[in-house]
Image: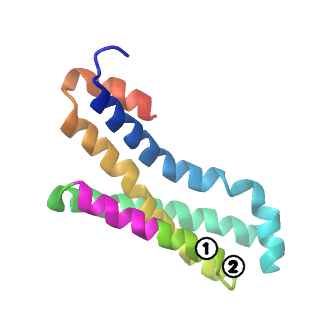
Amino acid sequence: MKGFSLSQWSVIVILALLTALEPLSIDLYLPGFIEIGNAFKAPVSDVQLSLSTFLAGFAIGQLLWGPLADKFGRKKPLLVSLVIFAAASIGCLYVPSIEWLWGMRFIQAIGGCAGVVIARAVVTDYFDKNNTLKIFAILA
């Protein structure tokens, strides 16, 4: 894509990484469902609920981070969300039961979805209207 400066490409790469955080949080642990179930002595159906709670947190988080980013700017809510995501990710390592995993995955999704929501807002803020569709295509 011609026409983007180095600083614009830097923003695009950062936004792409923020957008990829949430899908990676799903895709990287799906192959481990059986091992997770074995570790918690829980059926795979209980482990699958962690995916459902994650998706619920993702949906609810979008309702939260969009208005917060509009009110407080893009940077502060994004940084807070990344701290929440990181803390919940570490919390997932040390949960004592499958029920706690459900809760940590819910919190992790709420923190992680800000990257998706705020990245799209940054595109419309930072780039001109002629390039926004190109950037959205890159992020997708």
Find the magenta span and give its range: 74-85
Q: Secondary structure at mark 1?
A: helix
The percent coordinates of residue 34 (x first, y second) are 82, 64
Residue 65 visible in this rendered orientation of the protein: yes
From the viewer's perspective, tell me whether residue 90 is left or right of residue 127.
right
Q: Residue at x 64, y 81 (%)?
A: 95
Most foreground residue, 23 or 91: 91
Q: Secondary structure at mark 2?
A: helix
The percent coordinates of residue 94 (x first, y second) are 64, 80
From the viewer's perspective, tell me whether residue 103 is left or right of residue 117.
right
From the viewer's perspective, tell me whether residue 25 is left or right of residue 3.
right
Task: Report the amino acid beneath label 2.
Answer: Ile
Most foreground residue, 99 or 15: 15
Residue 113 lies within the magenta run: no
Q: How is the image coloured?
A: rainbow
Q: CA distance from mark 1 to mark 2?
A: 10 Å
Mark 2 crowdedness (10 Å alpha carbons): few <14, some 14-19, many ≥20:
many
Mark 1 crowdedness (10 Å alpha carbons): few <14, some 14-19, many ≥20:
many
Q: Residue furthest top?
A: 2
Disc nearer the start of the sequence (1/2) = 1
Residue 42 visible in this rendered orientation of the protein: no
Q: Residue at x 76, y 60 (%)?
A: 32
Can you say whether 24 is above or below 13 in the image?
below
Q: Residue furthest front?
A: 6
Most foreground residue, 52 or 101: 101
**Numbered circle sitting on residue 98:** 2
Can you say whether 105 is above or below 121 in the image?
below
The percent coordinates of residue 8 (x first, y second) are 29, 30
Provide the residue designation for mark 1: 92
Can you say whether 53 is above or below 41 in the image?
above
